Amino acid sequence: MLNFDMYIPTRIIFGKDTQKNIGALLKPHAKKVLLHYGGSSIKKSGLYDTVTASLKESGLEFVELGGVVPNPRLSLVHEGIDLCKKEGVDLILAVGGGSVIDSAKAIAVGLCYDGDVWELYEHAKSISAALPVATVLTIPAAGSESSNGSVITNEEKQRKLAFGSNLMRPLLSVMNPELFYTLPKNQIANGVADMMSHIFERYFTNTLQTDLTDGLCETTLKTIMKNALIVIQNPQNYDAWCQVGFGGTIAHNDLLGLGREQDWACHGMEHELSAIYDVAHGAGLAVLTPSWMQYVYKTNRNMFVQFAVKVMGVDGSYRDPDAIVMEGIARLRDFFKKMGLPSTLTELGIEESKFELMAKKATGAGNGSEHPLGGLKKLYRQDVLEIYKLAK
């Protein structure tokens, strides 16, 4: 097990009607708030009225900025930074899912950075300050409600990049599973694939003596998968949503990654799909992950046997570990199909003619500074290209 520094400071306020208290929760921390959200769904559901009434009741001033879309855009981040500077905002409240929260985090660091916020994402520069962020979660998926990272799309450059700092972890996050009841089935499925991928990126490791976090990963995966099949059929099952929603938080607050080398190759490969084709992140991960497993498993066969047996329930002869692994991968593909997720890049509308370009961008080979993706197995341009081909 590797050394680690555990820092997970976000306060999680969980349960029914908790969104009604957001004003009182923020009152000790702010005088003027930026209310940041996506489209019209929070207004149609009544959540907008609930949140704004709570802010007013607590005597908090607020300005608002809507318009966040999946794969949140840099242009709106710039607009938010300008608005917050003009209005003297001292806290950002993100009401939405991962895209809204990621956009809020980008605004929060951009306000305190002397330069263009995109430089942080493009060059991984360090930061010394960020405005506080709070969230009311409406889509369990990205885990951004307690994570230290944010992913933003630069639409002009067709680049989707991540940036992280513990200064970006939300101050507090409100999670009422009742707010998930009206989610479309495709958003439920995409969210489940995203949170599972966050666990996979930590679980598949070459680090030894990680029994505790192995077990935490395996239990969280099984809990999410079991309850995901329930909510996809009955989106108003509160108890199942509790398991899925909190599972998404645990998947990405980095508890499951402590003391172990992490991978993140699938995320790096998928970001190119989203940047060029604007596909849903979870859908892209559902397509790429089984193909990545198929390509890399021989690097650490034992880890994938463990996954197949302990998570996917495969019962086979340990004299034929390859068969156990392939059955585990097949069962994962089958689970994604049951959730209504795509199985191939073709289903996502990804053209094979773009594979080479995406592989070059993912690894930096296109600009002459190639670097490998992944921790379990180092993936260079040709490796990434082969995985795209396996997934086509």
Image (cartoon, rainbow, N blue to C red):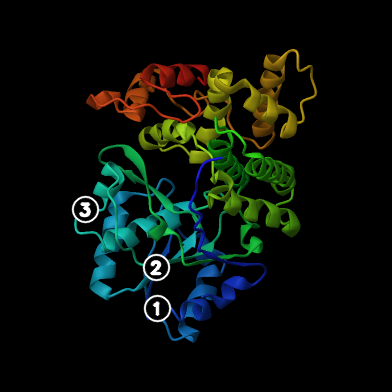
The reply to whether the C-beta atoms of the residues labelled 1 and 3 are less than 8 Å apart is no
Which of these two is toward me, 79 or 264?
Answer: 264
Kindly give the residue lying farthest to the top in the view shown. Answer: 320
Kindly give the residue lying farthest to the left in the view shown. Answer: 115
Give, as a three-letter code, the residue at label 3: Asp
Seen at 50% across and 59% down, the residue is: 96
State which quarter of the image contains the N terminus: top right
Classify residue 94 as left or right of residue 315: left
Q: Name the residue under label 3.
A: 116
Give, as a three-letter code, the residue at label 1: Ala
Residue 277 appears at what percent x and percent y?
A: 40, 33
Q: In this view, does 102 lie above or below 289?
A: below
Which of these two is toward me, 185 or 355?
Answer: 355
Q: Distance between the residues labelled 3 and 2?
A: 19 Å
Checking the image for residue 171, the label placed there is none
The reply to whether the C-beta atoms of the residues labelled 1 and 2 are less than 8 Å apart is yes
